[in-house]
Image (cartoon, rainbow, N blue to C red):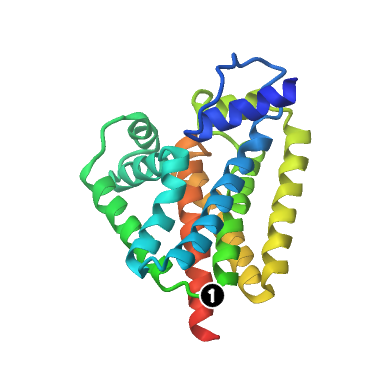
Amino acid sequence: MNLLQSIIIAFSMYSKIPMPHITWNEKNMRFAIVFFPWVGAVCSAIIIGWHYLAVRIGAGEIFTSAVYVLIPILITGGIHMDGFLDTIDAVSSYQTKERRLEILKDSNSGAFAIIYGIAYILFCFAVWSEIKSLNAVLVIAVSYVFSRSLSGFSITSFKCAKNSGLAATFSNMSNKRRASIALMAEILISAAVMMLVDIKFGTAAVAAGVIMFIIYRCFSYKMFGGITGDLAGFFLQMCEMLIATAVMALEFLL
């Protein structure tokens, strides 16, 4: 029962999929973060389903690419994009570490957040428009599980920049040791699946994700003194963009 409640908490927090109301407690929060990648699995399934539907109905390249970009945003309700935008605002302020953390909590969007948000969407649209092969689509789809596994692992393993907030709540209430092991298993399984689908595309995707994960840790510690929920969202968006870009670049070369 506690595991079922953990699943519900993960989906109610990280997706817009309707879920029953669950009161958070020490028992059902211990492994809630472990099921965060399952939201990515839903994104993966819908993206793959959209690919086959788009081919079947003869959807145009522009419309197909736009839907690819919108699927994860609609499923998650844009929670990770919100973290991306908040992080852009904080970094663009060139303020002290303490002030940057305050800006992360500000619900208002600054000019830089809007500019970079539009640029991000346009770039992702352009990348998807260049993805042609089925294997490339499948690898990118599975990467939504991979990126969330990495993000979840950071919450159980990295230092939090503050003692309050979403990341700190999930981190403090998790059984860190067991949750980290489970998330590492999800990282390895999703990485293996991507490489089984296509060894070249899969390897490029895994390498891109790991590189972004290392950058994320260094960036978060240097600029904020640790991670927050917004920074985890920023990482997720950047990781998914970098993976798709790496797959696209490799497809150009093949």
Image position of 28 (left or right of 47): right
Q: Position of residue 183 (x, y in %)?
A: 71, 43
Q: Residue at x 78, y 34 (%)?
A: 178
Q: Position of residue 33 (x, y in %)?
A: 64, 34
Of 7 and 169, the residue lying toward us: 7
Of 241 and 129, the residue lying toward us: 129
Quadrant into which the N terminus falls: top right
Q: Can you name the residue that lies furthest to the bottom here?
A: 254
Q: Residue at x 57, y 71 (%)?
A: 134
> Can residue 84 be seen in this snapshot?
yes
Looking at the picture, does residue 60 appear above or below residue 254?
above
> Can residue 215 be seen in this snapshot?
no
Q: Position of residue 220 (x, y in %)?
A: 49, 45
What residue type is disc 1 on?
Ser
Q: Which residue is mark 1?
A: 133
Image position of 4 (left or right of 253): right
Q: Can you name the residue that lies furthest to the left here?
A: 111
Total marks in image: 1
Where disc 1 sits, the SS reads loop
Q: Position of residue 205 (x, y in %)?
A: 59, 66
Label 1: few (<14), some or many (≥20) within 10 Å? few
Looking at the picture, does residue 193 appear above or below residue 152?
below
Quadrant into which the C terminus falls: bottom right
Of 2 and 29, the residue lying toward us: 2
Image position of 173 (left or right of 167): right
Q: Residue at x 36, y 69 (%)?
A: 61
Q: Residue at x 65, y 15 (%)?
A: 25
Looking at the picture, does residue 130 appear above or below residue 116?
below
